[in-house]
Amino acid sequence: MIGIVGGGLAAAKLVEGYREAGGTDEITIWSQDPHGPYHRPPLSKRLLRGEAEPKDALAHPPEWYAEHGVDLKLGDAVSSLDQVQADTVVIATGARPRDLPGMLPLRTLDDALELRRRAETASTAVVVGGGFIGCEVTASLTQLGVQVTQIVREPLVFAPLQAQALSDTLHETYREHGVDLRLEASDIPTGADLTVAGIGVQPNVELAREAGHEVRSGIVVNERFETAKPGVYAIGDVAEFFDPVFGRHRRIEHWSNAAYHGTTLGKILAGEDTRYDIVSSFFSEEFGQSFKLFGDALDHDDTALEGDFREGKAVLRFLRGGGVVCAVTMGQDEDAENALKDEIRAGAAAAA
Ligand SMILES: Cc1cc2nc3c(=O)[nH]c(=O)nc-3n(C[C@H](O)[C@H](O)[C@H](O)COP(=O)(O)OP(=O)(O)OC[C@H]3O[C@@H](n4cnc5c(N)ncnc54)[C@H](O)[C@@H]3O)c2cc1C
């Protein structure tokens, strides 16, 4: 039996990958969320704006799990890994938002529905945070007609990307839409109808730590998602996995990473000889404008901009030792993206 602790995207994709690769063991998923696995990206975008409903965000319809031999236990928090009686244990507990007292968080479907309900009667809102949750919530609330003040501690939006050109363009777009976006700000205005915190997450590592697994920024696993203890794996937001493309451990809090981890571990558990082997990616959307990130900007020593984010078509390359290790893109087709991934693969190998 395979026991999966956590019922997010990584868990749902694991089941898919496992069954498609011919895996026949029974699977149990324990999830403390009352809803079955769902995609979180719509929660700050289409669902928050009322353009999508909860069923649209589900990874699979409710009946899919039983049809695929899965006992899905919802609303059930696992308090110790000893509770999980399975030959194979997968920790896919994701992350939870850091909270600010009195402010709404946004992580779960129920958080999004609550925020949507409150936005219906709000005229003003304060959003704290300049990462993707803060920026997307600001854009969505503005599109709903709410006057938003966004408080960003750093001098840039999406500060970890260190992409000045992208930050400048987003800032301009936000101003054009009437957002009061305050960079390098720490004072949180009072008196708004709605306040939302988007100040990052912390991985749910406690179960693993208590069970004696190595935990650094997340649960430490190799490129096959194995902890040091045979039969115990970790995937998704909670895992600090070995990325062979960059030759080091990384923890990534993004949709495509959770999906890929799940699918790949599913194949591994079904007996396929595979491992993590992609150039990581991330996407975000504000006011109908999407950008993507490929690779890892950490430790770059130079950048090169091609095109113009303001015109919706740009590639910002991050270089280390002359090679490309990361790219932030807007308006590129799949061929161009694939070519960039090849550049990053080569650049990361050279820099490792
Ligand atoms: C609002 C929002 C918008 C996003 N938008 C984007 C985007 O545009 N692009 C992008 O790349 N990424 C985006 N992300 C990030 C992406 O959704 C996450 O990286 C992804 O959901 C991680 O999946 P996961 O399965 O690892 O963890 P999670 O989705 O966090 O799932 C973990 C599950 O485990 C459960 N759990 C935790 N502890 C226990 C326990 N002890 N017992 C039982 N169950 C437990 C939790 O309740 C949860 O259901 C967004 C995230 C949010 C919140």
Image (cartoon, rainbow, N blue to C red):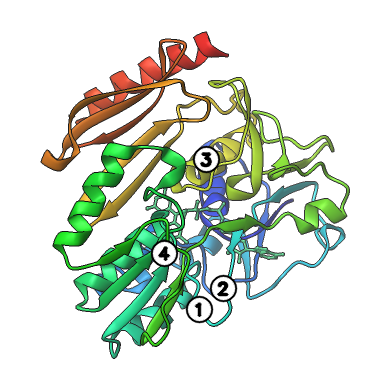
**Residue 246 horizontal side relative to residue 177, left or right:** right
Helix, strand or loop at label 4? It is loop
Mark 4 closeness class: few <14, some 14–19, many ≥20 residues within 10 Å = some
For image coordinates 57% across by 73% down, the residue present is: 100
Residue assigned mark 2: 100
Residue sitting nearer the eye, 72 or 322? 322
Q: Amino acid at mark 4?
A: Leu
Return the disc, 1 or 3, that comes first in the chain's sequence. Answer: 1
Rounded to the nearest whole Å, what is the CA distance between mark 1 and mark 2?
A: 6 Å
Please identify the quarter of the rendering in which residue 261 is found: top right
User: Type of residue at label 2?
Assistant: Leu
Q: Mark 3: which secondary structure?
A: helix
Q: N-terminal of the two: label 4 or label 2? A: 4
Asked if residue 82 lies left or right of residue 314, the reply is right
- As drawn, the label of residue 263 is 3
Q: Are marks 1 and 4 in contact (CB under 8 Å)?
A: no
Left or right: where does residue 59 sit relative to residue 47? right
Dot 1: element: loop
Q: Are marks 1 and 2 in contact (CB under 8 Å)?
A: yes
- Comparing 108 with 60, the one in front is 108
Q: What residue is pinned by disc 4?
A: 58
In the image, which is nearer the foreground, mark 1 or mark 4?
Answer: 1
| The CB of the residue at mark 4 lies under 8 Å from ligand 1 | no
Residue under pointer 1: 103
